[in-house]
Amino acid sequence: MTFATRVRFAPSPTGYLHIGGARTALFNWLHAKHTGGTFVLRIEDTDRARNTEEAARAIYDGLRWLELDWDEGPEAGGNFGPYFQSEREEIYRSYLDRLRAADRVYEDEGSVRFRFAREKVVVDDTICGHIEFDLTNPETNPDMTIRRSDGSWIFHFVNVVDDIEMKITDVIRGEDHLSNTPKHVQLYRALGAATPRFAHIPLILNHDGSKMSKRDQGASLVTYIESGYLPEAVRNYLCLLGWSPKDNREKLDLAEVVPLFELAKVHRKNAAFDLDKCTWLNGEYVRELSDERFQEMGRHALEKAGIDLSKFSPDYVRAALETCKGKFRIFSELPAYGGFYFKDDFEYNPEGVLKHFVPENKSRLTVVRDAFAVLEKFDAANLEAALKGTAAALGVKVGALVHPTRLAVTGSNAGPSLYHLLEILGKEKVLARIDRALNQLPG
């Protein structure tokens, strides 16, 4: 008899959602969607000293930000709850009684140990293949504690009990759990339960080959949320950490991944995390955002940086943001790129000052100001003509005027199209900013 696929993501609420945990959740979600199965969220909160409600909330928020909604679990309900281990005490006691009745556990200084069958255990892992574990030697594999002397439960036991009770068919988790698998297989057998299919996904490594930890750069999903990454870009990048489509495309929508994703195609080799590549991929998604969503996220990024947009008209904000689209990779870069539209007291780029705020440019910038001041129609076309005409009159290249003008008006050496940003700022603001710069130029 074939049972419908049921997978679970079972994090411990001891802190933020780690990027590795997010990848594990994603692979479980993809397998459930690919097979028409059920994705279960279970909170493993037996460590009461370290678990917090805030951390559980951070897990929910992180999964929802990634748009990985669960079919069963906290706030979703289901027929196999409770979905918090802290609320399943009676269930664990009943399973412990079954092991006692089968003489598979014994007391040891107040704790309870599970008595291993001294045998070799074979695991046919969907990703790692056929693996044989030798549990015959009690010195190298002593009987496993499943309940501490203080009455608290050990992960191995409650994890297996919950998977049995929740009818989990596929256990998809990190490869660091592979060594636990023979112990879990023995628990399934001792409890008379069917063993699920196992799939251990490769670890995520830093560039130096070390395992990525919670303290490493880019480890927290919160970092991506607060830095203005797009969930679809982060999901896309996580998909590529251990899996890739046959055509090796790097940019894939989640809807494209679902029919292609197969656990058997997940790579055996550990995946190297590359924050720069994730950021590049995010920039590709930012370029393709709808105007409405780009404007919404742009306004949010500016306001988060302390810019009060209520002082500016909606049309002004929209026009300013339009010139920034495709010019940055993550939204936390937007205030530095386009913040000049919304503040007059910006600082000048030090390298630009050394290069462009030089004595000979004071007279040139004065002539540029005068050319701008007499324009009746202050638009990009007329501004470009005025600047080029001034350059010709002075006998210099246009760039000799473009760079000091940009620095004077924006404080930066690079940015949106100069003529368009001048038009958006308007004559009054442009002239005032040039005057401010002239007061600081030597000569």
Image (cartoon, rainbow, N blue to C red):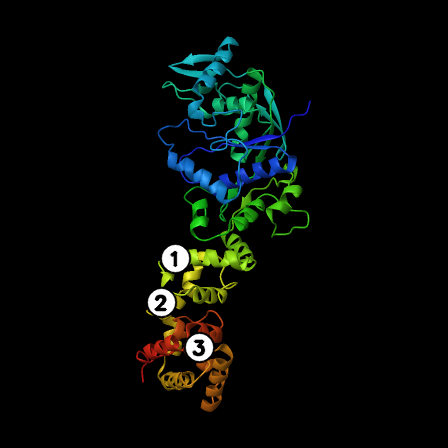
Q: Earlier in the sequence, mark 3 or mark 1?
A: 1
Q: Earlier in the sequence, mark 2 or mark 1?
A: 1
Q: Give the answer, above or below, for where 331 lies relative to 134.
A: below
Type of amino acid at the residue the image marks with label 2: Lys
> Marks 2 and 1, how far apart in space?
13 Å
Circle 3 sits on which residue?
403
SS at badge 2: loop
Circle 1 sits on which residue?
303
Residue 198 location, x and y as percent?
59, 30
* Mark closer to the observer (3, 1): 1
Q: Residues within 10 Å of mark 2 (few under 14, many from 20)?
A: few
Type of amino acid at the residue the image marks with label 3: His
Q: Earlier in the sequence, mark 3 or mark 2?
A: 2
Q: Which mark is residue 343?
A: 2
Residue 253 location, x and y as percent?
60, 49
User: Which quadrant is home to the N terminus?
Assistant: top right
Left or right: 127 as drawn, with respect to 437 = right
Type of amino acid at the residue the image marks with label 1: Glu
Q: Give the answer, above or below, for where 260 lies relative to 407.
A: above
Q: Which mark is residue 268?
A: none
Left or right: 139 as drawn, with respect to 443 = right
Residue 403 seen anywhere in this rendered image of the structure: yes
SS at badge 3: helix
> Marks 3 and 2, how far apart in space?
20 Å
Residue 149 or residue 318, whichever sits in front = 318
Q: Give the answer, above or below, for where 172 lies relative to 397.
A: above
- Quarter of the view holding residue 315: bottom left
Residue 407 or residue 151, whichever sits in front = 407
Give yes or no for contact between labels 3 and 2 (Cβ–Cβ under 8 Å). no
SS at badge 1: helix
Residue 171 location, x and y as percent?
57, 30
* Mark closer to the observer (3, 2): 2
